Image (spheres, helix red, strand yellow):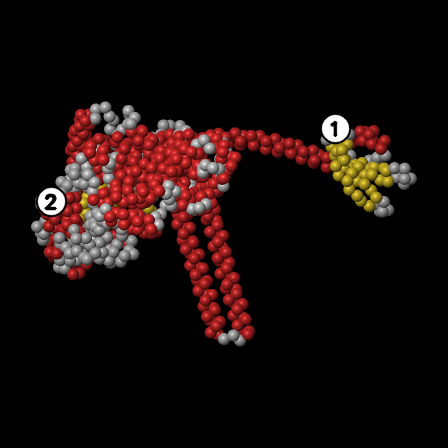
Amino acid sequence: MLRIYQNTYRRTARKAVVYSTKVICCNHSTLCNITRQPRRNGAGPQWEQHHSRSHEQFLLAGNQARGWTIPPHSRGYGMFVVRILRGALKLRYLVLGGAIGGGVSLSKKYEDWKEGLPDMKWLEDALPQGERWSQFSQNLIEMGSVVKNAIDIAKEDIRSKTTVAALGIPADESRKKYEKLQSQVETLQTEIMNVQIKYQKELEKMEKENRELRQQYLILKTNKKTTAKRIKKSLIDMYSEVLDELSGYDTGYTMADHLPRVVVVGDQSSGKTSVLESIAKARIFPRGSGEMMTRAPVKVTLAEGPYHVAQFRDTDREYDLTKESDLADLRREVEFRMRASVRGGKTVSNEVIAMTVKGPGLQRMVLVDLPGIISTMTVDMASDTKDSIHQMTKHYMSNPNAIILCIQDGSVDAERSNVTDLVMQCDPLGRRTIFVLTKVDLAEELADPDRIRKILSGKLFPMKALGYYAVVTGRGRKDDSIDAIRQYEEDFFKNSKLFHRRGVIMPHQVTSRNLSLAVSDRFWKMVRETIEQQADAFKATRFNLETEWKNNFPRLRESGRDELFDKAKGEILDEVVTLSQISAKKWDDALTAKLWEKLSNYVFENVYLPAAQSDSFNTMVDIKLRQWAEQALPAKSVEAGWEALQQEFISLMERAKKAHDHDNVFDQLKAAVVDEAIRRHSWEDKAIDMLRVIQLNTLEDRFVHDKTEWDQAVKFLENSVNTKLVQTDETLSQMFGPGPWTRFAHWKSLTQDQQKRRSVKGELDKILKNDVKHLPSLSYDELTTVRKNLQRDNVEVDTDYIRQTWFPVYRKHFLQQALQRAKDCRKAYYLYTQQGAECEVSCSDVVLFWRIQQVIKVTGNALRQQVINREARRLDKEIKAVLDEFSDDEERKAHLLTGKRVQLAEELIKVRQIQEKLEEFINSLNQEK
């Protein structure tokens, strides 16, 4: 069969249409050209075919029936085309097969390579989140808009200038406008530069993070299919950690810490900080013109490393000391920490600021830079600054294994030095003192070279030292780098007069490089000589503490403050969970009681009593209740709900104290956490608006629905009135004194004022007896009558005194009447339902208290749902936030977790840590030998 795949049209010489069709013989996979010519007799088309010889019979047999003819002169050409196409088709299958096979092989290789990669899921947390990139792109778009605006402003400026010139506008106006536009452009350029600087810092930070990630990836790749190994710390890092532990353990200088370290001492502005920076090969400390900058001890651990970086002990950030921006940040952080360590009006502090500096070629050692010795105090210093610096310096130098790096300013007279006397007091034989003369370049110009030689040979001062060194710490330029200073120092000593005359100074006594080598050598020699002795001392201390613990707390484990805090945290959060499991009935009872406790006084004083004085009780009640619901009632209800929640939580904590496994060491901490969380917790504001709507709708109902509610309202009224009667009786008892039986039994007598009160009460009782429905206030005539009757009995009182006595007397009278009405209304429900407000028995009191009771019910129900659904969870969040804050506050934990047990456990844990680190360091030190 044939398949036609292309049709073309052409014209013959006689302008007859010829159809040329290319077909493929499907059973031979060859291509044929068939030309169809119209028959001249119009009977049908004739075809001319160009085909190879091998298919001639096939085509003649199959196509002549259709009127096709094949021209014989085109067979050679058709055969050539067919062969080419057949080769191309074979090539297609080869390429396709190779592509499929190569794809399968590549996919298999990719899967093997993918399985060999380490697990990189941790990179999802380490890499920056998408918000940072989106913010960066947004800022770039804003920066582009700023540049576009600047260009538009410049174009507008040019256009305006042209307009000004064309219209003849004065040049002054054009110049002002141009200056204004130019200032705007400059401002925009400044903003663009600031944005570039900002994101350049971000890029640098990301590059550093990327470098760290690459290092971690290499470590993971190296340790693939092997057990994780702890990265080995350097020897100096291990020793520095021991000193850090001792610093935290011995903040009060109560324990003899005799581990070696290099103590840098000197007069203020003598160049001791510059010497330390020269040894560290970086300007890491802030500077001030004559101002005291070193306000606290700075412990600097120097170690060799591939990169020149610095890092504080309590942070993870590394400062690249090859970049000026990181150096500036480091100096600002040092200054901030120094100022933050000074509290209570002090000028200096004992708190140690610890940092590590690593870099190529750094000598391993631990140096402590102390505040400079001062001879005179300024007005902005604390009164004890001078003594505090002396005491601090003596403490560090009194360590028998400390190396004293005594810094002397060579540009001032040696006799003015204060530090040499202190050094001689602590190290009179000079067995651990290294003397350093700074600013020798200035000293050579100002002083006699022979005098300098005497100082460096130890012949001028009575102070003795292991060695004497001369250094140059700068050229007086703040912007000089350490490399420039060191080059200047070497050039100076090469050309110095001190070497061209027959002096005693040797080449190894000069330059900061030789000084750092000498100090490091002496430091490690001192460490090797004394570390074993210090480890034995801590081992003995640990044994004594463990013995004391076993004798005092034999059944308890040594739990430090952190562990105790975590345990207390778990117990507090468990109580919060228990709070959410309190039954609905218990919440309803607690909220109802708290609500009535908050609202009862207002109901009696501002609603019930004023309405009873008016002629229209029900109207006055409606007005008072509506005003109350619109203003004070919702807020008071929320306050009651908050206090009920607080009361229930505190009661849970109190019940937990009575458990048999309760540990009272947590009581103070738990109480502080609960108090702080409750103080921070506040009810949601939208609850007030919700309650207002509910309460207003409830108070609109003035009809008691059934006998059960009526009986409950009567009982509620009786209980409330009886409570008020008890309170009124207590007030009357204090006002009128005890009764006859009490006076007889307890040998008490009435005071003169109480006798007067009793006389006034007798007259007032007569008035109430004559008029049972008396108004709450006395008329003028009644006051006059009472006063005159008392005068006949020789009792002198004024009208105010009578009114003060009348108030509690009338209140008791009113409450007794209200209680009687409640008893009368107990069985009057059906009479009330039939006659309503015109009932013979006045039961408006019962209806009022039924309305109050209904408001309390719906309010308590709403508050209960709010407590269970929202407030308990919000209180839980507050408690967790308080616990997180307390966990980071070591001072507060130390204040709240106290006692001999806690202090002994803390000391024992600390001594164990120090001893273990010392033993680890000693083992590494012995291996290095």
The answer to which of marks 1 and 2 sits earlier in the sequence is: 1
Please identify, in this view, whether the residue under mark 1 or under mark 2 is nearer the observer: 2
SS at badge 1: loop
Q: Position of residue 625 (x, y in %)?
A: 44, 44
Question: Residue 69 location, x and y as percent?
Answer: 84, 35
Amino acid type assigned to the residue bearing label 2 in the image: Asp
Residue at the (50%, 30%) spot, across then down: 111
Q: Are marks 1 and 2 in contact (CB under 8 Å)?
A: no
Q: Position of residue 18 (x, y in %)?
A: 82, 42
- 812 and 437: which is toward the camera: 812
* Residue displayed at 15% across by 58% down: 412
The residue wearing badge 2 is 427
Q: Is residue 42 left or right of residue 802?
A: right
Q: Secondary structure at mark 2?
A: loop
- For the C terminus, the image quarter is top left
Q: Position of residue 570 (x, y in %)?
A: 34, 31
User: If the image is split into quadrants, where does the N terminus sit?
Assistant: top right
Q: Which mark is residue 27?
A: 1
User: Could you tell me which residue is drawn at 27 percent across and 45 percent down?
Assistant: 760
Residue 861, picture quadrant: top left
Q: Is residue 240 visible?
A: no
The answer to whether one can see residue 148 in this image is yes
Q: Residues within 10 Å of mark 1 (few under 14, many from 20)?
A: few
